[in-house]
Amino acid sequence: MEKSEEERRALIARRGAKKAALTRIKNKMDSTYVNDIEMLKLMIERAQEAFDGYEQLTLDVGDQEDPEPIETTYFECVAAMRNRIVELSGPGPTSSDARSVAPATPHVSSKLKLPNIEMQTFSESRALALENSEGRGDTASGAASKVAVAKAASSSFVTTKPSQDCLYCGKQHKLYACPKFSLASISERLEFVKETKLCKTCLNTHPGKCKFHFRCKECKENHNSLLHVNEEKPSVSLANVNNEPLVLLPTVKVKVISKSGKEIIVKAMLDCASQNSFVTAKLAKELGHPLSPGTTITGVTLNDKCIKHSLQLDIFSCVYPFKTNVKLLVVDKFTKEMLPQTKIDISKIKIPENITLADDSFHIPSKIDILLAANIFFQCLLSQPEELRDPDAAPSLVHTQFGYIVGGDVPSSILKRPAVTLFCQECQTDIRDTMSNFWHTEKVPEIYAEHTSEQQQCEKLFTETVKLEDNQFTVSLPLKIPIYDVNNTLGDSFGLALKRFYNLEKRFQKDQMLYDGYKDSYMNILI
């Protein structure tokens, strides 16, 4: 079920709060030397909860936000806090010390000092952890399943090792890390991915839509960078001399009427080789007539193109009392450039003075808004006067319901165009593109700063709501969302809270000192 716009905005706002929480924790680690192990453990737990919530909200929103900056912030922050815990514990920890500095995830030994995390290694391990969690056949459904997968990905990035062989060379690594696959040509890679039915984003097999949002670092499209096809610009060699004749296509000026009754004179082209008539989308919008469903057409290269809309329109002649109703297919444009391609010297063409041209500006390049097909072309033909039946005339004059049209070969001697010779040996990349790619590569991760800190919000809430009643001070709770919307926002959180309570009980059963410390520190506050 698709979410409404209000629900999406609410999810995005909650996701922003999770990102802000991670940023605050990281800023605290960067600016303050925390020497309390319990405080560090609490900060790790809060960071993990914020990151889990961010991943879940990203899946719920379903947009294309890049999670890499937040992931980098989270893992750098957690690694720094765990290293700080190891430093504060001192050399040779006892068994109780080892329990006190144990990380929040079961995959990392508390006796090991975590290394600095490289982004590439982390990304590979994260992708592998997510694949392994899917391969175990987890049957949980809904949001709980997504959270479990996200936790598996974030908690096993240190110790998980590849468990599957490369499909390309058979060795113990993933396909995107295979040196043989990287050395293969781009055509061989594409063919291999197609034959093995792999996902073009993560280079793995999985049901349904890919859960990763990787983008090609070259073109930013939704495919793996190893499958990017370089569109090389070949050397260009173009020679154009002025002794080649021009084929003049017949054009006419016609009158059309808009929905509001306004008369519009536009230029149309008669095409005796087309089975369909066309109109530009710009003119169709200006006319304002209702549109009908289109059809599929086939071009000269046997390529099919689906036309979404069509338009039923009356075409009027500007010369004779002639009208015809035409079904026009709506396209953006049907000629690459204006017609004719170059200006023609009309003084060198023999045009009788007693005829009326269908297009008195046929010799001037201009845009074409309508193309009339063969059925209209032959419908509008009239008898040809005897004096104009000259087979050697170039161009030819043909009598139609729209007036006399001019078309055919035009000798190069009457074309107003200079001789052009262009030779380009090599096309190089623009320096602006190179500099843009350089700055994009050197871009640093963004820090998501809050507009108003939580401390300022709490102080404002305290000053506005604090009051003294019966010798007792009361103040409203500092909630980030309205109290009436808390249950709707949290959803069914009882199961998750109960699971955490059971996990806490197990820890207390294994460690009596931890239970006593918890009881002394927190239970007295609640009493």
Image (spheres, rainbow, N blue to C red):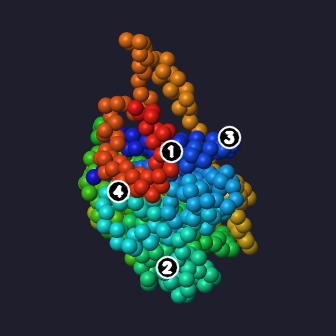
Residues tagged 2 and 1 counted as in contact (Cβ below 8 A): no
- Circle on res. 32: 3
Mark nearer the viewer, 4 or 1? 1
Q: Residue at x 34, y 65 (%)?
A: 306
Q: Which mark is residue 163?
A: 2
Mark on residue 144? 4
The type of residue carrying mark 3 is: Thr
Q: Residue at x 31, y 44 (%)?
A: 491
Residue 517: assigned label: 1
Helix, strand or loop at disc 1?
A: helix
Quarter of the image holding residue 481?
Answer: top left
Q: Is residue 218 left or right of residue 488?
A: right
Q: Secondary structure at mark 2?
A: loop
Please give the name of the residue rendered at 42% of the width and 55% of the height, measured from the top-left corner. Answer: 509
**Is residue 115 visible to the viewer in this orientation of the structure?**
yes
The answer for how far apart the CA atoms under marks 4 and 3 are is 35 Å
